[in-house]
Amino acid sequence: MVTEHTISQYPMMPLRDIVLFPHMVAPLVVGREKSIRALEGAMEEGAGIFLATQKDAGVDDPGVDGVYQVGTVATVLQLLPLPDGTIKALVEGKSRARIESLLDAEDFFRVEVVALPADDEAGSESVAYLREVKSVFGEFAQQNKKIPKEVVKSLLSIDDPAKFIDVLASHLPVKAEEKQQLLEAYSLFDRMDLVLGFLHREKEITVIEDRIRRRVKKKMDKAQRDYYLAEQMRSIQQEMGGGQDDPVSEMAEFEEQVKARNLPTEAAAKVAKELKKMKMMPPMSAEATVVRNYIDTILSLPWGDKTKGEIDIAESEAVLDHDHFGLQKPKERILEYLAVQAQVKKIKGPIICLVGPPGVGKTSLCKSVARAMGRKFVRLSLGGVRDEAEIRGHRRTYIGALPGKIIQSIQKAKVNNPVFCLDEVDKMSTDFRGDPSSALLEVLDPEQNDTFNDHYLDMDYDLSDIFFITTANNLPSIPLPLQDRMEVIKLDGYTEEDKLRIALDYLIPKQLQENGFTTGDITFQDRAILEIIQRYTREAGVRNLERTIAAICRKVAHERLKKRTDKKFRITAQGIAKYLGVPRFRFGLAEEKDALGLTTGLAWTEVGGELLQIETVLMPGNGKLTITGKLGEVMQESAQAALSYVRSRALRLGLAPDFYQKLDIHIHVPEGAIPKDGPSAGITMATSLVSAMLRLPVRRDVAMTGEITLRGRVLPIGGLTEKLLAARRGGIQTVLIPKENQRNLKDIPAKILKSLTIEFMDHMDEVLERALLLPEGEVLFKDVPLDSFRAEAGAVNVAH
């Protein structure tokens, strides 16, 4: 029975992965503030310190509950401050003790401990135990060779059983939990039993380790022999084959690459399996070539290689502004997106999709984003792709199988986090070989693309660090499930002022350099550039504008060399025709005079907005309606709805109820080779019809867009920005748009709104009153007696 001694107070310091025994002197490096203060307090008091081992070494600030209750009272022999702020302490264990209570924990732990008495169970039995422990320890020391001989000699010279066991315990290669178990054993015989068990176990482990060591050495000797024979074989093959490729060296090269690369577990297992198969194949067999290409593909992928760099928003904004003029809203959206990525440090969210007409800078904007992020740029054009295997790759069972374009592009980039531009995502098509847009669903889904499975690799590859940006001209051409995975950023066409600035600041300096001119060799007047924009190009972007400027530079270069002159050339508006010939387009498509049945509408196309002329002529006949101009089904239905509206308003417009039965009506939309469709020309057709029937001219400076219903309501339309740009470009002064589109004006650039008078229409009656030219004093809609109206309308309710 153990009798506990008196209670004492000591500063307490928790220990990590070390158990201090009585009679043990140990150096400790201390870095925690509480522990340093506890040591300093112990030195000041001179009474000692209580050292207890932590239950979990990973906890930085353990409480009293986080340490074992039994520890050692020790004396602090020396404290030595180190340059890094830590303290090296030399302590000596004195006696066992158990925590009774916690007194203070503010600056450092101060505890009340109960000293546990020294065990003095002496006698013949303890002497026998001591001899057995020393004998087993001597055998263990001879086998282990890790304990210095001087230490072994010093230990074996200790005659006090309790001291011997405590000092020996500090040298045993056992876990801290087992040493703590030994510290907590009160009885000397219990401690001796535990030590004997530890020693016997460690002896067995040492024997097993020695057996493993001999086996490994034997294998190494065999490996050296195999290496020697392989070198001999290589020398013989070189002598016989004149230095042909050596399959053995190729295998060794693959194995070295596998060791050098930090491959994921799945990829490493695949390569090891394929290498094993390859060793058993004839080197020149077709199957060996397939396996060789597969291993080479896996090893060439950047599994963990990434471009390191932080996103600097100010620098990113400067890069975008330097590379692109205008495009303020797209830039703002991109900078917002980059700001979020800079905060979360991980690209996880919608994929950006840049939608806009050709030539507005979608692809070059992607390059600028890569430059702003400090990452590599990869571009993959999806135009015309119609095979799913182009995205996912071919299975290796096929001859000539290759990984998909996604994996191939990553191979070329050599990093796992490039900016990846999927260009022309709206130009993909489908046939019997599969649907590539469906394959892209996994690539562009942030929740799935960390386990993208290429058919050729037949394993998961992580695409989640890649910044995907897609581009498209026509959003409706992209399947809806694919649209759902992308955040659409719209790029509208440029105004003439924007194009002028772009030409002066970007295009002309670039073409001068590419054609061998220096600054000042060719100067362009602003009016000359506007002449090119208005009469030689018609586009939403600036691609044709750049080509036209390049053509002028080439002609000037030819003229300079032909005349052998170094004179400076000045391009004026009057001299443009000399270099570019007759103007290709008539600027300002608005009619020169007001005309009957001729109305100007507004249309949206993939290259921007266009002015659309709609003509109506009447001929004697029997009520036939002819619609020409390669119009789609929706547009033809709009024409029929417009005619029905006019018939419903016949009496109020002053027309005979049966006017349509004596006339043939022909509605034509010029440029008949170009397909046209959509409902937004409804009010334009109705205006053209009423103008022809009432013999009232339409205002030449008015353009309109809007869908019409049978009741004459004007419904909202899309593509408003492009349509207003076309009206401004064509010299239109007034644009009539549906009233419900008023909310879209906040997205229209201010310079466009300032140059146009925009009026909002809710009903077709308002459109007619604004667009038709009436003789002075006349009104368009007549007052009709109710009886006449009912007689004309019959049972059909056509009231407004």
Image: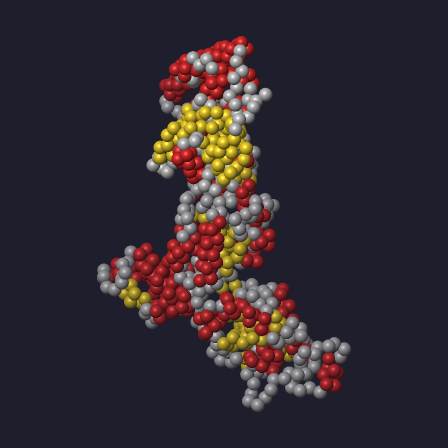
Q: What residue is rendered at 62% in x and 72% in y?
A: 708
| Position above or below: 33 against 748 | above
What x and y, as percent, mark residue 782?
65, 86
Residue 85 in view in this figure: yes
Q: What residue is rendered at 59% in x and 79% in y?
A: 766
What x and y, as percent, mark residue 659?
67, 80
The quadrant the C terminus occupies is: bottom right
Q: Can you name the residue that lies furthest to the right here?
A: 795
Q: Please tell me which residue lies in front, 577 or 550.
A: 550
Q: What residue is rendered at 44% in x and 14% in y?
A: 158
Number of numbered callouts drawn? 0
| Position above or below: 778 against 625 | below
Residue 412 in view in this figure: no
Left or right: 741 in relation to 171 = right
Left or right: 340 in relation to 687 = left
Q: What residue is rendered at 53% in x and 52% in y?
A: 350
Q: Please tell me which residue lies in front, 142 or 103.
A: 103
Left or right: 311 in relation to 395 = left
Q: Quadrant of residue 319?
A: bottom left
What x and y, as percent, mark residue 62?
51, 37
| Position above or below: 487 against 707 | above
Q: Please tell me which residue lies in front, 332 or 485.
A: 332
Q: Can you name the residue that lies furthest to the bottom here?
A: 777
